[in-house]
Each structure stands twice: as structure tokens, then as C-alpha cells.
Image (tube, grey):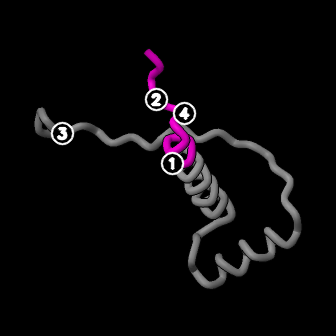
Amino acid sequence: MMGSEKKKTKPKMVNITINLPQIYDQNIQKLIKMKVVPSRSEAIRIALREFLHNEYKNLKLLGFFEEHV
């Protein structure tokens, strides 16, 4: 390995249990069958990532991250 290359490591995963409405799971199963997502876990990770990204953008637009001097 060259000196400037960094070894890529997977982010540490945490196992959690959640309760979802049955219709959510049915729709996730449809997405899996359509090969849109490979698994329930990945579908939920994608949804959460998009939610957090959108919330960050909304808070930024509202000036939440501006420094008050």
C-alpha cells in the first residue's frame, strides 16, 4: 500500500429494534422484490440518511447554524 493511501473501513453499525406499521414493511418488501434496495436494513438506512440530510438543509436555511456574535 502506498503511503498516501488510507485503508477504508466500514462505519461501525449499531443493532436497533424498531416497530413499523405493517404497510411500511409491505412496501419495503416490494422494493426488495423490485431490486430497488437489497434489504430492509438498507431501505431504512437510505430513508434515515435522506431525512437527516433534508433536516440539516432546512435548519441551515432557517439560520440554525449561524454564529451569533
Q: Is residue 11 left or right of residue 19?
A: left
Up the image or down, 11 lies above or below 68; here it is: below
Which class describes the residues within 10 Å of circle 3: few (<14), some (14-19), or many (20+)?
A: few
Residue under label 3, please give it: 5
Q: Is residue 10 left or right of residue 17?
A: left
The numbered mark, 4 or 1, whose residue comes first in the sequence reads 1
Residue 46: % across, % down: 58, 59
Up the image or down, 22 lies above or below 13; here it is: below
Q: Which residues are magenta?
A: 57-69
Q: CA distance from mark 3 to mark 1?
A: 32 Å
Up the image or down, 61 lies above or below 31; here it is: above
Residue under label 4, please give it: 64
Which class describes the residues within 10 Å of circle 2: few (<14), some (14-19), or many (20+)?
A: few
Q: CA distance from mark 2 to mark 3?
A: 35 Å
Of tags 2 and 3, the one toward the viewer is 2
Residue under label 1, please give it: 57
Residue 1: % across, % down: 15, 40
Residue under label 2, please give it: 66
Kindly state the secondary structure of the residue where label 2 is placed. loop
Q: Name the amino acid type tagged 3.
A: Glu
